[in-house]
Image: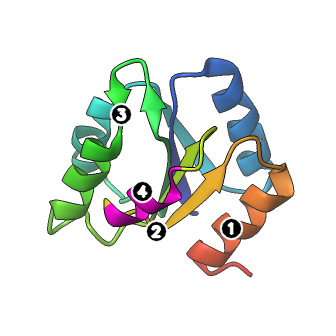
Amino acid sequence: MDRIIVVDDDQVFCGLLKTVLEFESYQVTVEANPDALVPLIQHMDQRPTLVLMDVHSEQGDTLDVLRELKNDEALKTIPVVMTSGMDRSAECMDAGGDAFLLKPFRPDELIELVADIVGRS
């Protein structure tokens, strides 16, 4: 089963994403602290199929976490979809992101993008 890690410090938003994605038969892990993402993945038995990460968190900008993930030889092939309420798509793509979703987005936009990336379309 495809596993998606959602990295966002907004608990309500994470709950909504988790519900939408689980309805589509994805396993979802939620992580509020972006700095915990790389260690979390490194200790998982099975690599996630995709990471969905907000650009802004209480700890600050998550682009450094994205770069760290993409610079790790064992993890760099994991697709990362970045999200933000501001159009920071160029910065996210330059940092190694595979796609960008501008908030607010509709659930069907998310489902379609995720399905395209994980090959479920």
Query: Compared to 1, does 13 lie above or below?
Result: above
- Please tell me whether the stretch drawn in magenta is mainly helix, strand or loop: helix
Q: Quadrant of residue 39?
A: top left
| Residue bearing mark 4 | 92
Q: Position of residue 92 (x, y in %)?
A: 42, 56
Q: How many neighbours does mark 2 have within 10 angstroms: few (below 14), some (14-19), or many (20 or more)?
A: some
Say which residue appears at 75% left-offset and 33% top-offset. 16
Report the Cα–Cα distance between label 1 and label 4. Answer: 16 Å
Instruction: Residue 93: say if magenta.
Output: yes
The answer to whether the residues at label 1 and label 4 have Cβ atoms under 8 Å apart is no
Judged from the image, the secondary structure of the residue bearing numbered disc 4 is helix
Q: Where is residue 63 in the image (x, y as percent from the top left)?
A: 33, 45
Say which residue appears at 69% left-offset and 71% top-offset. 115
Q: Look at label 1 and name its amino acid.
A: Leu
Q: Look at label 3 and name its amino acid.
A: Asp
Q: Where is residue 40 in the image (x, y as percent from the top left)?
A: 29, 39
Magenta segment, which residues? 88-94
The answer to whether the residues at label 1 and label 2 have Cβ atoms under 8 Å apart is no
**Count of picture labels:** 4
Q: Counting residues from the N terminus, which is met first, the one under dot 4 or under dot 3?
A: 3
